[in-house]
Image (cartoon, rainbow, N blue to C red):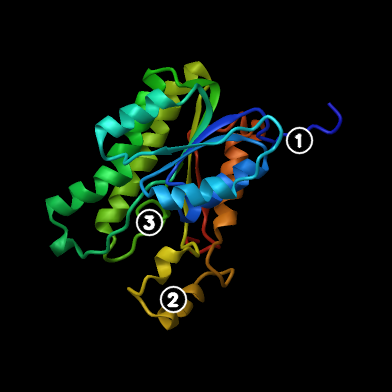
Amino acid sequence: MEGLNPFSLSGKSILITGASSGIGRQIALSCAEMEASLYVSGRNVNRLQDTLDSLSTHSGCHHKLLVADLTHSDEVNNLVAAVEPLDGAVLCSGIGLTLPVKFASQDKFKEVFETNFFSQVELVRLLYKAKKLKASASVVFLDSIGGTHDISAGAIVYGTSKAALLSATKYCALEFSHRLIRVNCICPGMVETPLIHRGTVTEEQLHADMMRYPLKRYGRPEDIAYMAVYLLSDAASWVTGQDFVIDGGISL
């Protein structure tokens, strides 16, 4: 047992959705560094190819690109059919929306729930039903503190989609446990990705918001990726049905 690294992903085959950018891309990079073989999936083939080209390749590791829009049932079915039995899956796809309650019409809920909730749970359901998740596999949903641990004005649509995903995590963990499959979710606060610098708020506003965090910074993609590595590894073999808040203390 000398030299054992319980956080190693060597010999594990892992699917990562939303791997073309942001947190999903970093999770893919970190898992590859820990010697996993990866299926990286997303909608943008060019950005996904860039992720694939950036992955470390250790001896015995094999990486594959799978383009899929998880809101299209035929593409989800094709994705499930394309993967060999998995040791892990990390679901990182998601969209945001800021609207006050009075403008949060049913069509807005449907749009966001389709990406943030229905497509995520449907993919896991199909992977489980097709026995594409090995015994003792680990499933990780990328959730959010929004709607789960931090309630903010204007976030009803996004927040409720994430609250629903947190609830689904616990039901999946319970029902999948007889195959020893673990299901957990990560709930980040604000993370430094290109998405937050797209111009909807000024850099001054971002800095002022950042100063509200007790640790005086936003998260980095690596902060989230390291938790994903832990949950995918054998070090977390007795952890299931949990939500892990990584938010620099903002929800305290």
Residue type pointed to by label 1:
Asn
Question: Which residue is at a point 62% across and 42% down the rendered structure image?
Answer: 32
Position of residue 173 relative to residue 35, above or below, is: above
User: How busy is the neighbourhood of tag 2: few (under 14 within 10 Å), some, or many (20 plus)?
Assistant: few
Q: Are marks 3 and 1 in contact (CB under 8 Å)?
A: no
Residue assigned mark 2: 206
Residue 91 image point, x, y percent: 43, 40
Q: Residue at x 14, y 63 (%)?
A: 103
Residue under pointer 1: 5
Residue 6 in the image: state x and y as whole percent.
72, 34
Residue 174: quadrant of the picture: top left
Give yes or no for contact between labels 1 and 2 (Cβ–Cβ under 8 Å).
Answer: no
Q: Quadrant of the N terminus?
A: top right
Q: Residue furthest right?
A: 2
Q: Amino acid at mark 3?
A: Gly
The residue carrying mark 3 is 146
Q: Which tag, 1 or 2, sits closer to the chain's start? A: 1
On the question of residue 22 being in view, the answer is yes
- Nearest to N terminus: mark 3 or mark 2: 3
Name which quarter of the figure residue 76 lies in. Answer: top left
Density class for disc 3 (Cα within 10 Å; few <14, some 14-19, many ≥20) is many
Q: Is 88 displayed left or right of 108 in the figure?
A: right
| 17 displayed left or right of 119 | right
Residue 140 at least partly seen: no
Q: Please, what secondary structure does the residue beneath circle 2 have?
A: helix
Q: Amino acid at mark 2?
A: Leu
Q: Is residue 60 above or below residue 132?
A: below
Q: Nearer the viewer, mark 3 or mark 2?
A: 2
Q: CA distance from mark 3 to mark 1?
A: 34 Å
Q: Position of residue 189 (x, y in %)?
A: 47, 59
Q: Position of residue 209 (x, y in %)?
A: 45, 75
Q: CA–CA distance between discs 3 and 2?
A: 17 Å
